[in-house]
Image (cartoon, rainbow, N blue to C red):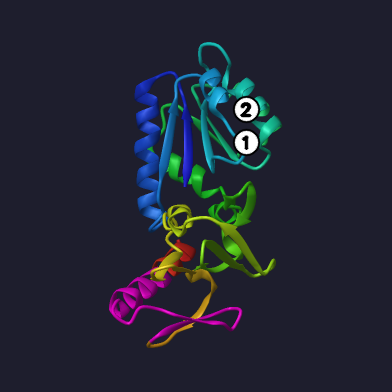
Amino acid sequence: MKAAVIDDLSECRNEIRDCLRQYVFDHLINEQLSIDYFCSGEMFLAAFQKQSYDLIFLDQYMKGLSGIETARSIRQKDEVVSLIFVTTSRHHAIDSYQVRASGYLLKPFQYAEFENTLSMISMKKLKRARFIHMEREKILLREILWCDIDGHYVQIHTSERGVLRYRSAFVEISKKLLDYPQFLTCYKGCIVNLDQVKRIDASAFLLTSDVWISYSKRDRKMIEAYYYDYLFQKAREEDI
């Protein structure tokens, strides 16, 4: 998960950071959390790129641009990202709906309130919208079956678009995918999407496309343990 916190007070930024880390620990098992911090709306907008964050926390009352003004500029670039306002007053609650805010936290708040606000956001929907870029082309994580290498080309096998080929070192696709818990290295030069696996046997994964992808016999115990742990944690998340 990639989040941004926009608040001119360092103690408030730290409070949101601590609550978000706790929420991910409690509810999003194996999720990698990355947080960027900004002390003004102007600073954030200068660096902001479309679809670069899953969540953005905004303080309403800041020097310069307010949270609402910052949110309006965000919406001009990104209509999908979830916005959560963190403020000392309810006076701007109506304004927050005009920018399609996902939540509204009133300072001071307790972790339980933070937890409840984030629980109202569909994390499953956020995950389904995630993608990577390859040569300026967007590829949804959920459409990837597996990746392998063919000479100087990386091949991304997808559920809808067939095989996508890019002239790239395999280490580049590895950096993009292996931060996500559903992606696992089967052997050198091959990564499989565990969300696309139907079952596993002693030497291979059977994918939803009915293709068998073999994995390293030497790493069999580690691979099987990771796979079953991933299934357990995924089921646990869905039950929370």
Q: Residues within 10 Å of mark 2 (few under 14, many from 20)?
A: many
Q: Which quadrant holds residue 104?
A: top right
Q: In the shown orientation, is residue 15 left or right of residue 49?
A: left
Q: Determine if residue 171 is in view.
A: yes
Tag 2 residue: 71
Q: In the shown orientation, is residue 175 left or right of residue 153?
A: left
Pinpoint residue 95: horizontal percent, then vertical percent. 67, 26
Q: Is residue 204 magenta?
A: yes
Q: Nearer the viewer, residue 112 or 33?
A: 33
Q: Secondary structure at mark 2?
A: helix
Q: Which quadrant holds residue 110?
A: top left
Which region shows up in magenta? 203-232
Pinpoint residue 23: horizontal percent, then vertical percent. 40, 47
Q: Residue at x 41, y 42 (%)?
A: 34
Tag 1 residue: 101
Q: Are marks 1 and 2 in contact (CB under 8 Å)?
A: yes
